[in-house]
Image (tube, grey):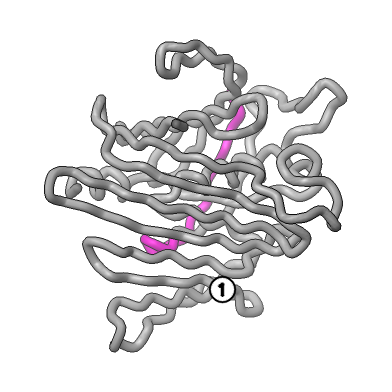
Amino acid sequence: MRFFRSALSCMVVFALFGSQWIAEYAFAKGKDTPSKIVDSGSFGVFSGAHRVATETFSIKQDAEGSVVVSEFKSEQGEEKAAQSSELDLTPSVELRRYQWKELSPEKLEATVEPNDTFLIERVLTAPNEKPHDQNFLLPASTSILDDYFFIHREVLAWKFLAAVCKQQKTGLGCPAKQKAQFGTLNPHARSSMLVNIEFTGKDKVTIRGSEHELSRFMLRSDSGDWAFWLDDTFKVVRLLGDNGIEVVRD
């Protein structure tokens, strides 16, 4: 677990949706539609050939906005780790509230909420201790990209598609080498940074012995680089970090 924590500490962070494009491609059409699960499943997290963790997730949308829920569990020998998160977004895709909890090996909890021109992170390290507040001069549109929750990267990919790609009758028109920059907040690290995403074109990828043609993207920042691949339904199938961590949809 020590190695895994060290590797993840170098990872890039990001997250969030787009508006019109997402409404027509990823989310249910119309404000009066009932609650709908737009994605759910699990990711296997690998270090080399070894599966070191599993993330189980769901993304739900209704007229009140969207909620991204995730559980992360790792077990290596006698070392176990479990965390959960919930990202609550308004219909205009701004942050309403974010919460993460570490259930083991320690008991930690943090929330992020907007307050005027600030985002306020409140960290609770023990039940009887006073929470520690930290302010970030960031708007509510800032993307939450937390360390252990890879589904946030899918949400950020949707935001990128909404920002730079065009809807066509035959599908999505996204020119190769198209780039965009996003502001992000990493609540685990209590830090913010800019990340750059670039669509690099179609790529043939072999996953569990089968070849797939997927859309490849690069996410770059001062913390490191990640490549990730989306299928034709705009869902993340694979991520690969320059730290050696690979994430594959089950």
Q: Is residue 160 left or right of residue 221?
A: right
Note whether 128 is above or below 82 in the view shown: below
Q: Is residue 91 left or right of residue 239?
A: right
Residue 184, horizontal then vertical, whole percent? 53, 55
Q: Is residue 92 left or right of residue 123?
A: right
Q: Residue at x 66, y 25 (%)?
A: 232
Residue 47, horizontal then vertical, whole percent? 27, 33
Magenta-colored segment: predominant secondary structure = strand
Q: Residue at x 47, y 72 (%)?
A: 111
Residue 46, horizontal then vertical, whole percent? 31, 33
Q: Please say whether residue 199 is one of the residues in the magenta stretch.
A: yes
Q: Is residue 106 left or right of residue 24?
A: left
What is the quadrant of the C terminus in the image? Answer: top left
Note whether 171 is above or below 67 in the view shown: above
Amino acid of disc 1: Glu
Q: Residue at x 87, y 24 (%)?
A: 169
Query: Residue 147 or 39: which is nearer the viewer?
Result: 39
Residue identifier under label 1:
113
Note whether 25 is above or below 31 in the view shown: above
Instruction: Estimate how packed mark 1 is, as few (under 14), some (14 to 19) or many (20 or more) residues with alpha carbons within 10 Å.
Output: some
Residue 60, horizontal then vertical, whole percent? 64, 52
Q: Residue furthest front?
A: 34
Circle count: 1
Disc 1 element: strand
Q: Residue furthest left?
A: 78
Query: Residue 160 or 224: which is nearer the viewer?
Result: 160
Note whether 101 is above or below 66 in the view shown: below
Region rendered in magenta: 187-200
Q: Residue at x 57, y 69 (%)?
A: 97
Q: Please say whether residue 69 is one of the residues in the magenta stretch.
A: no
